[in-house]
Image: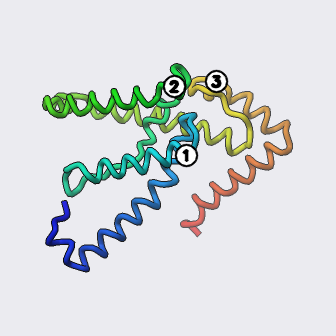
Amino acid sequence: MISAKDLKNPHVVRRDLLASLVVFLVALPLCVGVAVASGVPAELGLVTGIVGGLVVGLLPGSKLQVSGPAAGLTVLVFEAVKEFGLSTLGPIVLAAGLLQVVLGVARFGRWFRAISVSVVQGMLAGIGLIIVLGQVYAMADLEQPGSGLAKLAGLPGLAIDIVTDQEALTAFGLGAGTIAVLLLWPKL
């Protein structure tokens, strides 16, 4: 935490402002991306990022605490919006936040250490797979299915669409070429 004494030191203020700018530049597009991927308007991602940044900034925390949008929640938010509607998202998020505060005050955090690292890694790998599959559809400039399982099941149809549709083939080729350059460039 920065103290009032630190605010008088120009070196500390400059360093903190630079760090804040970097976090802002990373979080802003991530907030918008998570919002769009969650099926909500992009402006809600901006508002959420601003409000979240202000709230977290006002609360005490550790010196190493980093807060920001979590891409892992995209799938959960998408499903909640799909099932309950956008108007119910606010109360759901409020209830989840209050539950986290109650669990924190009750010191339940130590119980979550019992969750295996493999379980967490598996969950993150599943979320990553869903995000990557969605990007393959976007790379071919084709409509992607709504659920993760439908994205996986639709891969054979996607391959056929890419081969038979000239625009999809061009878009996919451009994306694949870009990925190839990114992977091979350091080896040149």
In the depicted structure, whether residue 70 falls above or below residue 54: above
Identified by mark 2, the residue type is Glu
Which residue does the image show at 14% across and 29% down from the upper left? 106
> Of circles 3 and 2, which is in front?
2
First in residue order: circle 3 vs circle 2 = 2
The residue at which mark 3 appears reads as: 153
Q: Quadrant of the N terminus?
A: bottom left
In the depicted structure, whether residue 137 falls above or below residue 19: above
Residue 54 is situated, as x and y percent measured from the top left of the image, at: 34, 52
Identified by mark 1, the residue type is Glu
> Of circles 1 and 2, which is in front?
1
For the residues labelled 1 and 2, the Cα–Cα distance comes to: 19 Å
Which residue does the image show at 62% across and 27% down from the upper left? 146
**Residue 142, picture quadrant:** top right
**Residue 133, picture quadrant:** top right
First in residue order: circle 1 vs circle 2 = 1
> Of circles 3 and 1, which is in front?
1
Q: Are marks 3 and 2 in contact (CB under 8 Å)?
A: no
The residue at which mark 1 appears reads as: 43
- In this view, the residue in front, 37 or 121, is 37
The residue at which mark 2 appears reads as: 79
- Badge 2 marks a residue whose secondary structure is helix
Query: In the rendered view, does 77 fall on the left or right side of 17?
Result: right
